[in-house]
Amino acid sequence: MPNLSFVSPTRNSPWGTYLSQIDAVEPYLGKLARWVETLRRPKRALIVDIPIELDNGSIAHFEGYRVQHSLTRGPGKGGVRYHPDVTLEEVMALSAWMTIKNAAVNLPYGGAKGGIRLDPKALSLKELEKVTRRYTSEIGIIIGPQQDIPAPDVNTNGQIMAWMMDTYSMNTGATATGVVTGKPIALGGSLGRVQATGRGVFVIGREAMRRLHIDMEGARIAVQGFGNVGSIAAKLFAANGAKVVAVQDHTGTILNESGFDMQNLLDHVAATGGVGGFKGGDAIANDDFWKVKSDVLIPAALEGQINKERAEGLQTRLVLEGANGPTTPDGDAVLADRGIVVVPDVIANSGGVTVSYFEWVQDFSSFFWTEDEINVRLDKIITGAFKHIWDTSEIHRTSLRTAAFVVACTRVLEARVERGLYP
Ligand code: GLU
């Protein structure tokens, strides 16, 4: 592991996971391997203090980050996450995965990510607004429509993007819609952006299933995480003939062998905040989720979920990574041994950032596309990227993850060589 003094990754921690993925791609980079060390270090990492006055009059401090892993192929791009477990190491890994994702899909961006360590459920709306505005102001020295463009991620949404856009615009003295994506439609947001990550998971799943000869009709789908990504993906799979048989979120795990009635489940989640207590299925123990028989398993929650032990027990044919970094290196090795195909995060969940790119382009041209145009272009771009990765995995006889890294790292390092080392 490179000698970075500010983090101590372990093999299966997020940054450790990313580094092992870089180790795996290195043999396939040919002459470009000379430059690979550049991918093992973030270009720039900013740690900010965010003090706010709480509703009860006391002062609270939060720690926030914005990491720009690479700016080689274009401005930084990647979401902002609010979660009690956010650390610099995690945000570094997430920013690096954005570099790989953007290059794998050939979007003209580097990679970046941000986060604040906080529990959003413990804050009032007013407190959340204050944290968001102060954070935006603090990272304002490195973000901008041409520099680095944040977007939603875990526990952030259009409202938070609206506050970010407003704060940046107030500080710079001009309305800058292109500084963030995932905004409300009224502020220059794009149609289809909210659904885009889940839609992309479905589109890539459909492509992978076709190649693996898994029939969509009646296919058994298990989903971990029923937020913006998992719920939309599940809905699209069900609408196309598959059966969503198991769902797990922070409120519990539910099972229905004949497939959930998706509308009832979505209504229940909208009313109660989670899948727990849903009457249209049986509650099962959380650990048993990993043993449910399925054709496609979609981890769409957080990192590090499919570890060695869980990978040994999985009864599925295809893992479709809706979350970023859900499989540890040890878990990945077990899945490869067992012949379970993994479609990696950097392509499986790339629909979100692809429509973010559309949003950014629309903001620059002040000309907005129809939802149909968005969805058709999204499908075409990520289907093409998936095909390229699939073909690369056949040429090199590697996993899809290593193939995605071959495609992406080659693009990043070729750009690096063309630009040259300064000074
Ligand atoms: N947070 C999403 C991701 O992990 C989207 C990022 C973006 O749209 O910039 O890909």
Image (cartoon, helix red, strand yellow):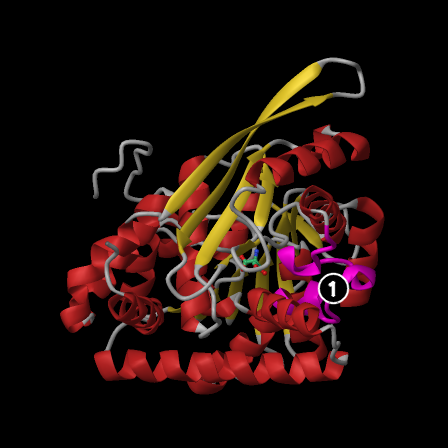
- Asked whether residue 124 appears in the rendered view, the answer is no
Q: Could you tell me the amino acid type at mark 1?
A: Gly
Residue at point 53% right, 49% down? 288
Q: Can residue 157 be seen by looking at this rendering?
A: yes
Residue 408 drawn above or below residue 241: above
Residue ID for mark 1: 189
- Toward the viewer: 406 or 289? 406
Provide the residue span drawn in magenta: 174-197
Q: Nearer the viewer, residue 125 or 232?
A: 125
- Was residue 135 drawn as part of the magenta stretch in this picture? no
Mark 1 residue's CB less than 8 Å from ligand 1 = no
Give the crowd class for mark 1: few <14, some 14-19, many >=20 residues within 10 Å. Answer: many
- From the top left corner, tell me how far across and down residue 277 is, in percent: 76, 46
Residue 194 magenta-drawn?
yes
* Residue 87 percent across, percent down from the top left: 46, 35
Residue visible at 29% across and 67% down in the picture = 419
In this view, 153 is above or below 194: above
Tell me which residue sits at (64%, 53%) in the image: 152
